[in-house]
Amino acid sequence: MRYLITASILLLCCIPRLLAQPCLPDGIIFTTQSQIDSFPILYPNCDTIEGFVIVDGQDINNLYGLNSIVVVVEGLRIGSYSSLTNPTLYDLNGLNNLYYVGGWLSIVGNQILNSLDGLENLNTIGEDCELKENPSLTSIEGLINLFEVDYILVITNNDSLVDLNGLNNLSAAGGIAIYYNDMLVNIQGLESLTSIEYHIMIFSNNSLINLSGLESLTSIGDELMIEDNIALESLTGIDNLLAETIDCLIIKDNPSLSVCDVQSVCDYIANSQGSLWIYDNNTGCNSVGEVEEACTVGIPESSTELQLSTYPNPFTTSTTIEYELKEISNIQFTICNVIGEVVYQAEDRVMRQGSHKVTWSPGHLPEGLYYAVLRSEEGVSVVKMVKQ
């Protein structure tokens, strides 16, 4: 009897899922609150909408009638591209069970939308995710469990948004475009993002000071563009981006930008095989030459006739550095990256007169420019090396 009761309980627990069904292969457009309220009556047990969903109406003030929806196979749009709409919709509560959107998610042109609360269970977006022209939007923390955007994440014209907290679990995206967000001070919230398949475009964000929030990003598949951000002072945040993954680098029209000598940019300049434009920024970042010079600050200049030579150079896996001492000498041999950090240091030792060799294999270190520095009683000698 006990087993029969247990089986009966399990069956009862499964009934809601057994009765759940897809609906609306042609999609649905909600233009009134009454349509939303009547959805669970007209489509009982529908948890998967096979078509698209559009919510755009003058009297819509809540989405609680859509609480059964778990999957939208095509796209979901909240708002309108033509004009500000949904003038009484303050948040997105009612979509709390939504887990997957197979196509685009567009939250656009919502007059008083203040937050994305209600989307906390959303995990994956199969195409673009677009947050556009929501003048009252101050928080996107409702996207806290969003893990993947398969195509482009677009955040634009959200005049009250100050950071991107809420995207903290986003680890992969096809591309990122962040522009025309007047109050955006930083892009904190993207700390889990490690790879971009296409491009990153960050432009015309008038309050953006730095790129802090992108520290985990190591690879992109195409273009990195930083343009027309009038308050941007530093590129700190993209230090760990591997230069070899950048196909095109554009840094221009940022009048306050004076710090461009981060590791990724220095490496790209040193070993660039793609397109490169740097101009119309502040002093120190106003040309490729200025940035290249800033990249070498902290690297000592040669002050001796003692010469270092290296071969092969450029190299891929290892290179050999040669030098000759005119007399017995105590030496210190180090290798630095372009921003002066020591990445290799040999033990200080006394070396005999004559020719000497050091073979260096950088292993996992990124492609880019490095400096071998030899200090001896005869002076300091430096040679440039390029890892490809």
Image (cartoon, helix red, strand yellow):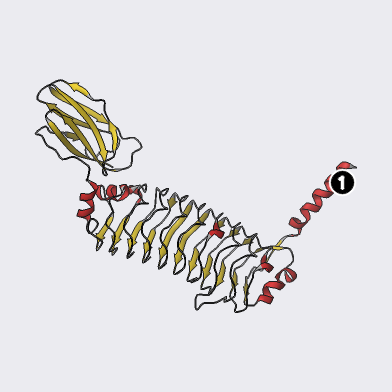
Rendered-image quadrant of the C terminus: top left
- Residue type at mark 1 is Ile
Q: Secondary structure at mark 1?
A: helix
Rendered-image quadrant of the N terminus: top right
Nearest the viewer among 367 and 227 is: 227
Occupied quadrant, residue 27: bottom right
Q: Is residue 330 left or right of residue 86?
A: left
Q: Is residue 189 left or right of residue 75?
A: left
> Is residue 174 something one can see in this rendering?
yes
Residue bearing the label numbered 1 = 5
| Image point (22%, 30%), residue name | 333
Nearest the viewer among 75 and 326 is: 326
Crowding at mark 1 (Cα within 10 Å: few <14, some 14-19, many 20+): few
How many labels sit on residues? 1
Is 289 above or below relative to 254? above
Residue 208: % across, % down: 38, 61
Is 60 above or below relative to 93? below
Occupied quadrant, residue 177: bottom left
> Is residue 125 something one can see in this rendering?
no
Residue 324: % across, % down: 13, 27
Q: Is residue 253 left or right of residue 195?
A: left
Is 334 above or below relative to 185? above
Residue 110: % across, % down: 53, 73
